[in-house]
Amino acid sequence: MTVDALLPLVAKPSRYCGNEYNAIKKEWSAARLRIALAFPDLYEIGMSHHGLQILYHTLNRRADLLAERVYAPDRDLEHLLRGRGEPLFALESGRPLAEFDMLGITLPYELCYSNILTILDLAGIPFYSRDRQESHPLVVGGGPCAFHPEPVADFFDAILLGDGEEAVVAVADLLIAAKEQSLSRRELLLTLCQIPGVYVPAFFEAQYRDDGAIAAIVPLVEGYPSVRRAVIADLNEQQMIDAPLVPLNRIVHDRLGLELARGCTRGCRFCQAGMIYRPVRELHPDRVMEMACLGIENSGFDELALLSLSTGDYSCLAPLLVQLMDHFAGQRVSVSMPSMRVGTLTPEVMEQVKRVRKTGFTIAPEAGSDRLRRVINKGITEEDLLDTVQNAFSLGWKLIKFYFMYGLPFETEEDVAAIPTLVAKAMRIAGGGGRVINVSAGLFVPKPHTPFQWARQQSISEAFQRIDYLKKNLPRNAKLKWNDPSLSFLEGVFSRGDRRLSALIEKAWRYGARFDAWSEHFQLPLWRQAADSCGLDLDWYLRARDLDEVLPWQHLGAGIDVTFLRQELAKAEAETYTPDCRNHGCQKCGLCDFKTIRPVVHSAEQISLAQIEPLSTAESSPPRTLYHYWIHYQRRDQARFLGHLELLQVIFRVLKRAGFPVLFSQGFNPSPKVSFSPALSVGTESLAEFVIVETATPLQDLASWHARLTSQMPQGLEVTAVALGLRVQPARMATTYRVFAPRPLNPQVVEEFLASEEWSIIVERKKQKRTLDVRKLVTTMTLVEPQTLEFTMIVEAAQLGVKPMELTATLFDLDRDEVLAARLLKVSWIAITTN
């Protein structure tokens, strides 16, 4: 069965179409190596992951490499594939994953581990590396959890630690050479060990003590005692993403992501990212501007996000923001900064961000008291926090979000009590007037390669005691959200777990574990049942570790000396501050050699940003003359799986990329003045769709606009004409449809229908059943071929009507599966004028 035949049977088929704008589709036979990049969560999450986009474009720049994508299928597609014996497929080509040479799986967070098994199982690839044959793809992991991968290590042939841009290409070149030299799988893995950052789990073995702790991690290959992460020395030497993937549906982070810098040396002692992504390497602001201009031009996004672990610490942020806003504000492209730090949210920065729309601020005090913030090396005081709140509200923001952690090492009851006290002070600054402060709280989970990697994690019951305290003591008008401690419990188990947990993951998966990061899917009792059957005590993994204990990740190096981590733990207990090495000299963490690896930081005083012309400014007042252009287009093949709201978003971005001079409404939240032809059901193809766009000036050379719009359409959408027309679409239309049925249709039904004066059917709208005479709505009907029905029906705005497939199914007694297997084509429409 083809992918095209499967998609009508799932709830959100646009997740699996692979026809996004800027998707790269290469000739299969022309590639020397074929790589499937997998993200073990839903499309909406995976398409928001910046790292996957980087690898996708890095690999596909090479003419001899082919990289395609796959995301974890939702439960409906999984059941469908399993029930029909069909393999999981890559989006771009629809080919089974088992046909690729390499399967690269991102490891973004611990609670996606069960989805890795879903991908492997549906691909027909054995779970364990030891069970794979020469014909199977090489399974490679990478991402944040690659630094503590032992719970899933047995599922991978190799795991890449650190920056992937250069290492993944090196792996690809080695795989090409291995194919040409017909190397065995073991010979290939032995060669992979030579690439910096590549970890081959099969070449290490853990030995355990009687109490369950690890006695030693024994290397099994001479000259390969440990693995140190790969580090990109300078981001400015890497090629930029100039044509980002543009999603078909609404994803979690639906925007253009620009990586300003990689790494953070603020030294927060709980933060794993701050340790494993060192040193700070800033992108030159001229490169940022170039990426922003090309990215918005080639995507049509209306928001760009400046990405970094601490965006506010970017050296040239203030002048860069001025130029970004000067350039993009006229086209209503907003700038968001998801990771701003208190103290860097200056009034100057806020003033720039609010020029298009106030995107909201999340402030992360992390702890309620200054004392505990000293423990975690946060480096901010209560005064800093309240000054930031004052600045934000005075500049017009209405919503501020506070994020706190509880269960931190050395935390006291007084530290927890300080959280509602701090929020109350912030609420007094807000002073009503529609200003809101939301509070989010999460349980601290100790992470490897941090000073707190030896700490105990609070139990679920202890965590709920903290939550109950906050619920009772926070100000009434502060909204509290908290992460489920049960999810944090399992995250903690996997964060510091060992290889014995691979059996747990497999068992829980066979019991039905899927999408554990989603509260609606997560089932802790299922995991406890699996642990019991494996003879594992999950609570044991949350215990405090001795400083001299052998840790499961001890052979995997982030580049940070363990001595430095121990010193930081002692400084935490003493409440001693460790300054940022960007501004206060090297703190001797052990990473930089100051030859190839060193901080790369730019000076705002020394940088002269290249001048870029601002984009045209939006209309400030309504024009006197308005023009309405009708863009006629077809919707075929996989574009038929777009829902109506998804289609609207696609068209808005097409217009933006094409530079179409769309007028916007006035007011607080301007929207494009565009109207669409009547909504089609998902799965309907059409030769006769239209968009009416309002402009302030007449267009010159409509043929040129036709070509520009066509070039910006994703696969399956094609512009057929651009013409000046009426302001509104007709209220009544005669629309012709063609149904391609999965079986021959009875011609006698057509004859009886046409001969009748009335034909009533029951339709359901908004959960209410109503009787409708459909005969008066259908003007013609003919059986073109035994399985092809064509009819014309009257469609009138705001009037009860019948859907084409609803009519066909009722007339010819099609069951649900037959309806899903049928194809529907909208052929044409004409306006019905009222005399």
Image (cartoon, grey):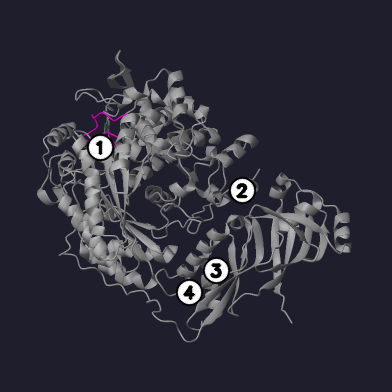
What main secondary structure does the magenta stretch of the protein show?
Answer: loop
Q: Residue at x 41, y 27 (%)?
A: 154
Q: Nearer the viewer, mark 2 or mark 3?
A: 2
What amino acid is found at the position of numbered circle 4 in the picture?
Phe
Q: Please provide percent x and percent y for residue 688.
A: 66, 68
Q: Nearer the viewer, residue 269 or 166?
A: 269
Name the element at disc 3: helix
CA distance separating discs 1 and 4? 48 Å
What amino acid is found at the position of numbered circle 2 in the picture?
Leu
Nearer-N-terminus badge (2/4): 2
Nearer-N-terminus badge (2/3): 2
What amino acid is found at the position of numbered circle 1 in the picture?
Ala
According to the picture, the residue beneath numbered tag 4 turns out to be: 660
According to the picture, the residue beneath numbered tag 2 turns out to be: 7
According to the picture, the residue beneath numbered tag 3 turns out to be: 710
Nearer-N-terminus badge (3/1): 1
Q: Residue at x 42, y 63 (%)?
A: 301
Q: Nearer the viewer, residue 760 or 275?
A: 760
Name the element at disc 2: helix
Nearer-N-terminus badge (3/4): 4
Depicted 710 relative to depicted 77: above or below: below
The C terminus lies in which quarter of the figure?
bottom right
